Amino acid sequence: MIETFTETKELMLRIRFLVSNGYVFYTKIQSNKSKKNKLIYKFSDRYYVDATKTKRDYARRIGNANVTLIFDESEQSEMLTFWLLATDGKGIVFDLEDMHDSRKKQSRITISNDSYELLRLPRPNDKARWTWVLTQEKYDYLLNEIKLAIRHKKDKTLRQLHFKIVRIYGFSGMRKQGFALLHYMRKEWIRVRKDDFPFNESYIGYLKVAVKKKTKINDVTINK
């Protein structure tokens, strides 16, 4: 599979899907956009990233790793970020690339300048599932920004923070964090400002997954 994404949410959805389906090893590298086709040819030749489902099923049965290639091609960035993701098994990808295990705390997948990370969280009466969360650094940064905005009466900044939080991507892990931030915002406002909380009915919606049409251009799958 070779896929290109320009929207962060769609990229996060796809990576979560792949990792939850066994593509737990990865490497992430930045390159010039002009090298995209060279990378496609290189990885297709080395790791069969363009293999069909039939070939992938056969590779899995005989104990070989399957590898997929994803490009993050945001228009706002001059650089191209790509991921090679692989399943467990035998393969030269583990000899030639610096592959990391996304299941380990020290090597989780992160995106958007390390603002989000992918991990498995337990669920009540259910097995743990993969979800995206704010990294601890990003979460602590938002907590501090909320505290400073309230204490220094920067109400415009606080409104911007509230707007950002209620529109956080609705992955289950991020929704929990978002509601915790909103709870802190309300509690801190009442404690410091001793007034009614100015944001009523603050709510973070669930993630809506739209069905995307896909077309292939030069063996690259483009989400439209």
Image (cartoon, rainbow, N blue to C red):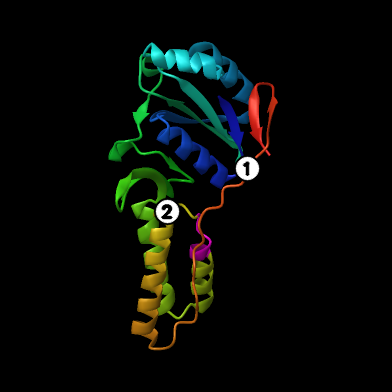
Q: In the picture, which quadrant includes the C terminus?
A: top right
Q: Secondary structure at mark 1?
A: loop
Residue 224 visible at all: yes
Residue for point 57% across, 25% down: 2
* Magenta stretch contains residue 165: yes
As drawn, the label of residue 172 is 2
Which x, y percent locates residue 118? Answer: 40, 43
* Magenta stretch contains residue 45: no
Q: Which label's residue is closer to the chain start, 2 or 1?
A: 2
Which x, y percent locates residue 78? Answer: 61, 38
Front-most of residues 48 and 32: 48
Task: Determine the CA span between mark 2 and mark 1.
Answer: 20 Å
Mark nearer the viewer, 2 or 1: 1
Residue for point 58% across, 20% down: 40
Which x, y percent locates residue 52? Answer: 56, 17
Which x, y percent locates residue 212? Answer: 64, 40
In this picture, is 209 found above or below 101? below
Amino acid carrying label 2: it is Ser
Q: Secondary structure at mark 2?
A: helix
In this picture, is 170 found above or below 204? above
In this picture, is 98 found above or below 185? above
Farthest residue toward the front? Answer: 125
As drawn, the label of residue 98 is none
In this picture, is 130 found above or below 184? above
How many neighbours does mark 2 have within 10 angstroms: few (below 14), some (14-19), or many (20 or more)? some
Front-most of residues 131 and 62: 62
Residue for point 54% across, 40% down: 11
Front-most of residues 1 and 57: 57
The residue range painted magenta reads 164-169
How many neighbours does mark 1 have within 10 angstroms: few (below 14), some (14-19), or many (20 or more)? few
- So how many labels did they put on this image? 2
As drawn, the label of residue 211 is 1
